[in-house]
Amino acid sequence: MTKIPGAREELDRAARWLRGQVRSVVVELTGDQDLEVALPEAPAITSWEEPLRFSYSVHVRHAMSGEPGVDPVEGARLVLASAGWDVTVLRDVPGVPTNIEARTGEFRMSLLISQARDSLTVTGRTPVMALHEPRRLHPVSPECVRCRRKLTALQVLRRRNLWGGRKPQPRHELWWECSGCGWLGYQHHEGEQLHAMRRLKGSEGDCFFCGEDQSNVAGEVWEQDGELRDWVVCLDCGTSNARRVGHAPHDGGPPS
């Protein structure tokens, strides 16, 4: 897929603005002037329809100051309204956490205020944006990294957790296989590097989620937090997950 010029930068700017808005609300209600609000390293896929659409989410949970005579619901409403947000108090019942929804343009923010526990939870979301042009129906087939034959497109569909009667959707990677040597793998986007996957055998080849026999493939092993992990994808239902495959080796020894 071809990147849309400037789209990622625009979404990153939106995320930084949202982070500032969320921080202002939390600081107002908690008094924590040293509060740091983290952003994810990358936006998440919000819609799997082509073209894929992405957004950032910001989440903060904090204890409130609990100052007597201060109404946190009214305080939150005033802070957001003064910043240009349209605010709706969805539920405000004594003894029950209060839900507040706010929006400005395509930005969204949700607050859950529990006065009984003096706790505040704020979640914000940026506008949803496409970062790449829609895929071509027939992307250019790359060469096999082993035998140099043209690879054949492999359709891997997400078939699980399709809410609202949605039809199965292709995974966002481009999957390929070689009819000659049997190589199997994927690209993140057309024209980019190919990543090899290996077919798993025996019980680990059976999908834990859909039960399909010998449908699991796995990528290269990496080290994380002292453990070895790999990425497994079911070619039948499209479900993927990272799994632990052992402890990382120490002093050049074999993995356990």
Image (cartoon, grey):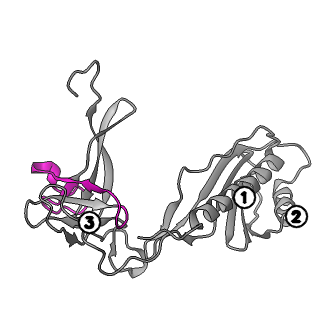
Dividing the image into 4 quarters, which one contains the N terminus? bottom left
Separation of residues labelled 3 and 1 (CA atoms): 36 Å
First of labels 1, 2 by sequence position: 1
Mark 2–mark 3 Cα distance, whole angstroms, equals 49 Å
Give the image location of residue 125, x and y in percent.
63, 63
Q: Which residue is identified by label 1?
A: 17
**84 vs 129, nearest the viewer:** 129
Q: Pinpoint residue 90: horizontal percent, then vertical percent.
A: 72, 69
Give yes or no for contact between labels 1 and 2 (Cβ–Cβ under 8 Å). Answer: no
Residue 15 vs residue 174, the one in the foreground = 174
Sequence-wise first label, 3 or 1: 1
Sequence order check: which comes first, mark 2 or mark 3? Answer: 2
The residue lying toward the viewer, choosing from 236 and 76, is 236
Q: Any mark on residue 244, and which?
A: none
Number of the label disc, if any, that sits on residue 82: 2
Q: What amino acid is at disc 1?
A: Trp
Read off the magenta span. Answer: 188-217
Residue 20 seen in render: yes
Q: Residues within 10 Å of mark 1 (few under 14, many from 20)?
A: few
Q: Which mark is residue 175?
A: 3
Element class at badge 1: helix
**2 or 3: mark nearer the eye:** 3
